[in-house]
Amino acid sequence: MIINRGGTLGVTYFKSYFELILSSRTSDLDEAKKIVFQRLFNNNPRQLGNETYQQFLQAYNNLANNE
């Protein structure tokens, strides 16, 4: 997946990515979070900027709370 590093990725983007991982690789949300964090952020929350990282966390929290 190609990422435009010039912009902030939103909650909707991350929710879709989580759902893709959940449907294809694992049924565990925590495992999906680890996979997404490693693949997109290279295990570095600053990799794509603070705002994008916050959107990532918000998407995870929304899915964890079934929103």
Image (cartoon, rainbow, N blue to C red):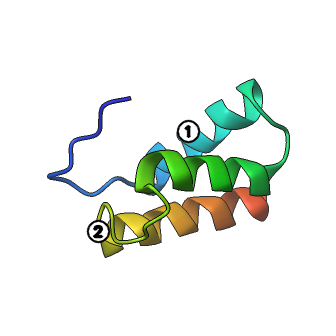
From the image, tell me which residue sits under label 1. Answer: 16
* Residue for point 47% across, 56% down: 11
The image position of residue 26, as x and y in percent, is 80, 36
* Amino acid bearing label 1: Ser
Residue 37 in the image, given as x and y percentages of width and height? 54, 56
Q: Which residue is mark 2?
A: 49
Is 60 placed left or right of 47 in the picture?
A: right
Residues marked 1 and 2 touching at CB (< 8 Å): no
Q: Which residue is at a point 53% across and 52% down the rendered structure image?
A: 38
Q: Point out the residue furthest to the left here.
A: 6
Q: Residue 51 location in percent, x, y? A: 33, 71
Outermost residue, right direction?
Answer: 27
10 Å neighbourhood of mark 1: few (<14), some, or many (≥20)? Answer: few
**Residues at marks 1 and 2, CA–CA distance in whole angstroms:** 19 Å
In the figure, is residue 58 to the left or right of 34? left
Query: Residue at (45%, 64%) from the top-left corner?
Result: 55
